[in-house]
Amino acid sequence: MKRSMMAFVLAAMTFAGTTMGVGTTTRDVDQPEIRRDGVGDKREALNKMELTAFDSSVLSKLSKWQNGEAPSADAMKDKVVAIVMWANWRPSSVQAIQQLAALNESSKGGLIVIAAHDAKMWDEGVKLAGEKGIKALLAHDEKGEFRAALKSDQNPDIYFIDRAGQLRFADIELGSVTAAAEALLKETPEEAKGRLAVIAANEKAAREKAAMTREAKNVVNPGEKIKVDFKMPEDSVFEALLWPKENDKQVVQSHANNIQGKKWPVKFGGEEVWLKGAAPDTRGRVMLVDFWATWCGPCMRAKPTLEYLQTKYREDLVAIGMTGYNEMKIDVERFLRSKDSEMIHAWDTDKKISEELQVQAFPTVYLISSDGVVRWIGNPLQPEFQVVLDMIIERDPGVKARRAAEAAALKKRS
């Protein structure tokens, strides 16, 4: 979100930034590539709907079915069902139907698509669907009651029901539709039914592993790592490696000054204030710096992915959330207290760091290898972001040197 829009956004919120910051974490944390839409209280309400039984009786709120009758509970049994709220005058919602209709054909009967048209201009919607050859089940949400039942407030809003009849994904982004459909179509009804238990087991295992790792390595909080002596590789070792491709220069320049391939110019320990966690030990670790704000919708959508990555790479990554942009520190502190976070968070006093880097859009993320060179700058919602981070951590010579020293130290202790 460009800074030029900030004043407008804040005014439109009527100082609602403190409530817009409610977290967007989802229950199905093992699939971060499927991005949910919405922020704040609405997103929290949608999260609670996920992995609960879908009440097929709400389909009775739709009328004037086209291309078939309203599917019964028996007809939907063991099938994946996609529901899209659409309006013929919104190109993105027409695109959503076309994409789902194509997935429906390729699924060979495994996917049912229900397209619920807005209350207005129903006849035009039917005509448009016919002209475009869309064979999905069309229905009219004449009174808006179907949308209200699913907490939908725009076109398109996209939902998925799994083979066990659970509302699995509530209101996801258009770019995640294919990934969601493919993931659910691969599951058996039994696997879908056991999904909640699998998630709970994975979360428990992750917590236990994290606790064991912290105990074994004396890691207590983010930024507090086991201290071992090791020699960082020479710069020439880093220079000889093939690093991931830098982000497109035009994309970068819309976010900040392009310093990809150059040394990170900021030295922490100056004007910033650490809100959660302490000044990090970055030696032998990749650093991720995220410039964000509680009022920024895309920042909230990116937050679950960033938290997931910090947990996944607990020992090899230092993820820092940098904020302090057109909001009060007390509101950010309240937001951070209300949410579990593995990341370290800092307040950019007087915006000195963002101005030094010329950050002009949120979120903006920097990926920095352990030699202090910025390898990638961009938006964490870009599809290639996670792939780039994975490659940097995998190839980083400093990370490898630190790991080897830690392994030797643990072996000596045992």
Image: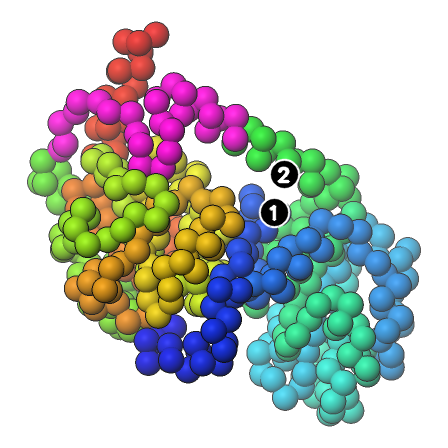
Question: x, y percentage for residue 49?
Answer: 71, 55
Q: Amino acid at mark 1?
A: Asp
Q: Residue at x 36, y 37 (%)?
A: 222
Residue 354: within the magenta? no
Circles 2 and 1, Cβ within 8 Å, touching? The answer is yes
Q: Residue at x 24, y 24 (%)?
A: 227
Q: Is residue 72 left or right of residue 28?
A: right
Label 2 vs 1, first from the N-terminus: 1
Question: x, y percentage for residue 323?
Answer: 33, 59
Q: Residue at x 74, y 80 (%)?
A: 117
* Disc 1: which residue: 28
* Disc 2: which residue: 199
Question: x, y percentage for residue 335?
Answer: 47, 55
Dot 1: element? loop
Whether 127 is drawn above or below 374: the answer is below
Residues shaded magenta: 207-233
Q: Quadrant of the N terminus?
A: bottom left
